[in-house]
Amino acid sequence: MLIDFFEKELMKAQKRFNQTFGVLNVCDLKTRQVAILKIIQMGRLRDAIMQSNNNDEVMEERSKFVKARNWLNNIFSQIEDELKERRRDANKRNQSKVIHLEQKLYNEEIEVCPNCGNIYKIYHLKEGDDWNDFGTRHCPYCGLIMDEYAHVGKK
Ligand SMILES: [Zn+2]
């Protein structure tokens, strides 16, 4: 059961390392390096502890193992908190983008085709390089040519 503890803690540390440092685009390289060394150290200590038949003999190793684990857990928690905050910020940004887009769509003028009666909106997303706006639009349903400026449709 004791051996299980050291093995499990090491596995947990490796997993959390990947979930924290592994997903960071930018991170403190020194902290990352120390974290890797601590995991390696935990592996060595686990081996020493597992090879020993006498708990008293490996008291120091056990203490070092727990210290390394605690240090790592502290760092992992800090990164996890930061990641959570980043996700929250990203969600907020996306939400405001969607609201902005909805408002834009809602405020955009709608076209009613005098020929076929379809109601639609035309979205102009980006101007082409050689584009001159003469105000000519086609109804996407019946093809009627509309003059935006004169507000008339002609067949
Ligand atoms: Zn039409």
Image (spheres, grey):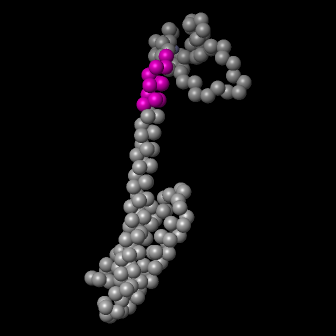
Placement of 96 over or under 140, stated as above or below: below
Residue found 38% across the figure and 61% down from its top? 77
Picture quarter with the N terminus: bottom left
- Residue 97: x and y in percent read 46, 34
In-image side of 29 versus 128 (left or right): left
Task: Say how many tags the image has.
Answer: 0
Q: Is residue 15 visible?
A: no
Residue 6 drawn in magenta: no
In the picture provided, is 151 more to the left or to the right than 3? right
Q: For the magenta stretch, what is the residue range?
A: 99-109
Examine the rendered structure and indicate whether residue 31 appears above or below residue 111: below
Residue 145 in the image: state x and y as whole percent: 59, 12
Main secondary structure found in the magenta portion: helix
| 52, 31: nearer the viewer | 31
Q: Residue at x 43, y 54 (%)?
A: 82
Examine the structure image and report whether residue 104 is included in the region drawn in magenta. Answer: yes
Residue at 32% from the left image edge and 94% from the top image edge:
53
- Residue 135: horizontal and vertical position, in percent? 62, 13
Instruction: Identify the residue at image location x=32%, y=83%.
Output: 3
Residue lying furthest right in this view? 130
153 vs 5, left or right, is: right
Q: Quadrant of residue 132?
A: top right
